[in-house]
């Protein structure tokens, strides 16, 4: 790297967790770019003490006034997780996007700090093989078009976790959570929605995950023998209360995580198709999100018009791909969100579920104000003329007409042969 390139960067905001990658990156930025470092650590509910990140940054020479540790739990759930769940969002049929949905918020706050501190660059610890580099950088450019982005994994020669550990040891960088069996730790990401695990022997898709790896959930076979019933209340498509107790969004999701984890709900072992073209295996724990997805679909089933519900289902894969691929701040995602949120105005009511041995089963649901379910019409008993069953005859004949015509043509063709 030329000196001119190094001098072009005066101040960098680093998305800093205090873990292996970003601790090494902090030191590497200092040595390579000779620039002032601002660290930003986001509390997204990962359940870890974040103050050690401050002490570690100070030890590595960051000025105390340049250290930002922000509690973003409430905004994360209210403005990112809940809007995503209004669309019942699932990527490739299984993944609840726990990592993907956190990245636009981190990018947003990182850019806010860059503006506040007059920084001219931002840096992240995403690898050149991963999706997060795309998510961070698309967000940064969407929010601050002229910002410079530094991605050390695309520049340095520290090409493995083992080399990172060696670099940390050589530069006296303290690293916690080495795997007890030795070697590099799992690559992990945690927030209020999920915790993910990658690397180590998970890179072999034929290897079973270690039971000791899981942190939030019991194995379903070890979960309580007695099921637990839980009732979730929704207003305008968002959960607002559990068993009659209203909660702030981040507290509600945390409570669903606790209850779901106790019953072994939300484990996933997935080989996903990454944005950069490769297949990658990850293991995930999303107990609260798994419950929430099931409950939200249940309340929508009685509140949404049939064609609106079907339209949402058609849009969901597109919406999921936008989030997975880093387009949260794109105009198309915003447009889809506006449409989805319009459908949620009448999604009000409650859902009761049973939590048991890895499953969240819907028991019943109702809406006191917006239910489209009319038992007087749907009944198998006498509906007193509410529904004229003879009407179905003409409807069926009209819809069968094109198929009957095609069948006659096929019969005629067969006779001619």
Image: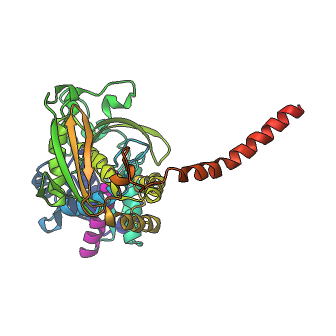
- Residue at 44%, 60% in the rendered image: 308
> Residue 298: where, in percent of width, then height?
31, 49
Residue at image position (21%, 52%) is: 17
Q: Quick check: 109 left or right of 68?
A: right
Where residue 224 sits in the image (x, y, percent)? 13, 30
Instruction: Please check the rendered image and state whether residue 389 is part of the magenta-colored stretch, yes or no.
Output: no
The answer to whether residue 183 is above or below residue 320 is: above
- Figure quadrant of residue 107: bottom left
Give left or right: position of 230 versus 208: left
- Place of residue 144 in the rendered image (x, y in percent of width and height, measured from the top left): 37, 72
Q: In the rendered view, would you say 284 is above or below 132?
A: above
Residue 269 as seen in the image, left or right of residue 180: right
Tell me the quarter of the picture where residue 188 sits: top left
What predominant SS class does the magenta segment belong to?
Answer: helix
Q: Nearer the viewer, residue 109 or 393?
A: 393
What span is colored magenta in the figure? 99-117
């Amino acid at each position: 790297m030329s000196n001119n390139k190094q001098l072009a960067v005066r101040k960098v905001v680093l998305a800093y967790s205090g873990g292996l990658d970003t601790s090494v990156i902090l030191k590497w930025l200092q040595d390579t770019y000779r620039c002032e470092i601002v660290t930003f650590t986001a509390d997204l509910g990962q359940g870890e003490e974040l103050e050690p990140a401050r002490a570690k940054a100070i030890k590595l020479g960051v000025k105390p006034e340049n250290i930002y540790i922000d509690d973003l739990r409430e905004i994360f759930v209210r403005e990112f997780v809940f809007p995503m769940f209004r669309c019942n969002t699932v990527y490739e049929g299984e993944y609840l996007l726990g990592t993907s949905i956190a990245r636009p918020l981190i990018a947003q706050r990182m850019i806010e700090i860059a503006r506040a501190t007059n920084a001219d660059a931002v840096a992240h610890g995403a690898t050149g093989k991963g999706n997060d580099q795309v998510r961070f950088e698309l967000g940064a450019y969407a929010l601050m078009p002229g910002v410079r982005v530094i991605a050390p994994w695309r520049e340095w020669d520290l090409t493995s976790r083992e080399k990172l550990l060696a670099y940390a040891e050589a530069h006296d960088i303290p690293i916690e959570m080495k795997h007890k069996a030795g070697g590099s730790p799992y690559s992990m990401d945690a927030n209020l929605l999920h915790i993910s695990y990658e690397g180590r022997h998970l890179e072999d898709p034929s290897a079973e995950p270690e039971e000791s790896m899981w942190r939030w959930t019991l194995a379903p076979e070890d979960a309580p023998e007695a099921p637990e019933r839980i009732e979730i209340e929704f207003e305008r498509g968002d959960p607002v209360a559990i068993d009659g107790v209203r909660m702030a969004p981040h507290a509600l999701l945390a409570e669903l995580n606790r209850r779901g984890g106790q019953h072994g709900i939300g484990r996933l072992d997935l080989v996903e198709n990454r944005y950069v073209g490769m297949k990658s295996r990850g293991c995930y724990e999303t107990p609260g999100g798994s419950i929430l997805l099931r409950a939200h679909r249940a309340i929508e089933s009685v509140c949404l018009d049939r064609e609106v519900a079907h339209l949402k289902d058609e849009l969901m894969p597109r919406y999921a791909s936008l989030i997975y691929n880093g387009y949260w701040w794109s105009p198309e995602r915003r447009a889809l969100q506006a449409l989805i949120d319009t459908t949620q105005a009448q999604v009000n009511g409650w859902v009761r579920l049973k939590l048991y041995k890895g499953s969240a089963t819907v028991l019943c649901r109702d809406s006191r104000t917006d239910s489209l379910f009319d038992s007087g019409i749907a009944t198998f008993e006498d509906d007193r003329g509410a529904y004229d069953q003879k009407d179905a005859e003409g409807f069926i004949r009209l819809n069968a007409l094109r198929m009957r015509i095609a069948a006659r043509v096929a019969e005629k063709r067969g006779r001619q042969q």
